[in-house]
Image (cartoon, helix red, strand yellow):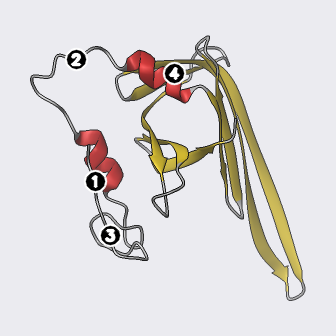
Amino acid sequence: MLVTTSKRPLVSNCFGELVKDEWPPIFYSLRFQGWNGPSQEKAAAQKLLGTWTLATGSVAGQFTFASNGRYGTTAAAQQRTLVAPNQVLATTQAYSGDGAYAVKGNTLVFTEDRGNTRSGVAQFRVEQISKDGQTWTDQFCMTKSDVPDVCYKRTR
């Protein structure tokens, strides 16, 4: 078990969220030498099952992982541009995809159905978070080589 603390609000330069969140690189670099425990891939895959959602004021995304090794994803991003002193242009871009996924250690391997030529790899974790130490929420986070840590809350 790893436990970190930061003063409120989370402003620490090490494990806070104000400057840069250093937790994902630390987490994904952990390795346990000499540990011969059972494979955790099935347990990790089981924890992934369901629907996970991310929503902010301008970005939303959702992943659904099924027990048969299939996934579906959808996302939208909105940009606002001032085009005149009294006019704002809102542009929304939508994305979707589906395919197969496989869990290999702490890595997710995605193979999209679009011609099976596009695949992606992301490091991931499923964790429980709490802001008060009383109520806990499931969270799924992943980091790709070109995208920083992104976290989704369980919705189903």
Expressed as whole percent of the image width and height from the top left, the position of residue 8 reads: 41, 76
Q: Residue at coordinates 77% horizontally, 50% vertically from top-left?
A: 93
Q: Residue at x 28, y 53 (%)?
A: 3
Q: Residue at x 80, y 55 (%)?
A: 92
> Quick one: label 1 or label 2, which is nearer the N terminus?
1
Q: CA distance from mark 3 to mark 4?
A: 31 Å
User: Which of 100/68 is in front?
Assistant: 68
- Residue 120 is left or right of residue 21, and the answer is right
How far across and how far down the image is residue 90, in percent?
A: 83, 65
As drawn, the label of residue 6 is 3
Distance from the alpha carbon under mark 1 to that under mark 3 = 10 Å
Reading the image, the residue beneath label 2 is 37
First in sequence, mark 1 or 4: give its number. 1
Q: Quadrant of the N terminus?
A: top left
Quadrant in the rendering for residue 87: bottom right
State the residue position of label 4: 46
Contact, mark 3 vs mark 4 (Cβ under 8 Å) = no
Q: CA distance from mark 4 to mark 2?
A: 18 Å
Amino acid type, residue under disc 2 in the picture: Gly
Q: Residues within 10 Å of mark 3 (few under 14, many from 20)?
A: few
Label at residue 3: 1
Disc 1/disc 4 C-alpha distance (Å): 24 Å
Q: Amino acid at mark 1?
A: Val
Task: Kindly identify the amino acid type of the residue bearing the numbered disc 4.
Answer: Gln
For the residues bearing labels 1 and 2, Cβ distance under 8 angstroms? no
Element type where label 1 sits in the image: loop
Q: Check contact, mark 1 vs mark 4: CB within 8 A.
A: no
Residue 31 tag number? none
Residue with the most extreme top position: 68
